[in-house]
């Protein structure tokens, strides 16, 4: 029974709102005001186009960052490898010198 009572109240409220809306007169706007609103709408539409380009800019920046990062990591790895070669060659020279001193060769 509670459910039907709530439904009746909702129906009454809906009918009251419909009647109030029918009685209410539409506001009268001047032609200049309507033109101004349409110009604002067009300007707003143009602004949204510039925001739609933001993802493109982000993807381009991400691509540039990825390329620069790859070049940086590659150069660091190359430099590290060259440093390692120098260390290995120094060790080999020391080992050769030690072996020569053990054999008695000058």
Image (spheres, grey):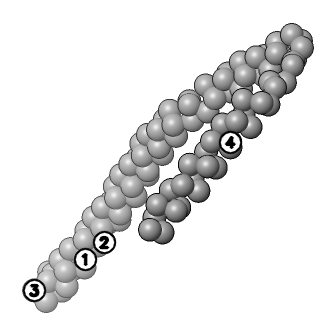
Circle 3 residue: 103
Residue drawn at x 71%, y 18% as measured from the top left: 42
Q: Secondary structure at mark 3?
A: helix
Circle 2 residue: 87
Residue 2 lies, in percent from the top left, at: 48, 69
Compare marks 2 and 4 and give the one earlier in the sequence.
Answer: 4
Residue 72 lies, in percent from the top left, at: 43, 52
Compare marks 2 and 3 and give the one earlier in the sequence.
Answer: 2
Circle 4 residue: 17
Looking at the image, residue 34 sits to the left or right of residue 2; the answer is right
Q: Is 39 drawn above or below residue 52 in the view shown?
A: above
Query: Residue 96 versus residue 62: which sits nearer the camera?
Result: 62
Give the image quarter of residue 79: bottom left
Q: Is 75 drawn above or below residue 32 in the view shown?
A: below
Looking at the image, residue 20 sits to the left or right of residue 87; the answer is right
Q: Residue furthest front?
A: 1
Label 2, label 3: how far apart the Cα atoms are:
24 Å
Circle 1 residue: 91
Q: Secondary structure at mark 4?
A: helix
Compare marks 3 and 4 and give the one earlier in the sequence.
Answer: 4
Q: Residues within 10 Å of mark 2 (few under 14, many from 20)?
A: few
Camera sees residue 55: yes
Label 1, label 4: how far apart the Cα atoms are:
94 Å
Compare marks 3 and 1 and give the one earlier in the sequence.
Answer: 1
Give the image quarter of residue 82: bottom left
- Pick the quarter of the image with the N terminus: bottom left
Q: Secondary structure at mark 2?
A: helix
Q: Residue furthest left?
A: 103
Label 2, label 4: how far apart the Cα atoms are:
89 Å
Query: Residue 25 versus residue 99: which sits nearer the camera?
Result: 25
Query: Residue 1 versus residue 68: which sits nearer the camera?
Result: 1
Label 1, label 2: how far apart the Cα atoms are:
6 Å
């Amino acid at each position: 029974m509670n459910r039907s009572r709530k439904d009746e109240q909702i129906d009454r409220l809906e009918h009251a709102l419909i009647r109030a809306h029918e009685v209410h007169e539409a506001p009268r706007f001047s032609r200049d005001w309507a033109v101004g609103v349409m110009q604002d709408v067009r300007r707003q539409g143009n602004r949204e186009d510039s925001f739609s380009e933001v993802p493109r800019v982000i993807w381009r920046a991400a691509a540039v960052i990825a390329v620069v990062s790859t070049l940086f990591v590659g150069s660091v790895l190359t430099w590290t490898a060259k440093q390692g070669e120098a260390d290995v060659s120094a060790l080999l020279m020391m080992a050769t010198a030690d072996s020569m001193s053990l054999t008695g060769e000058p």
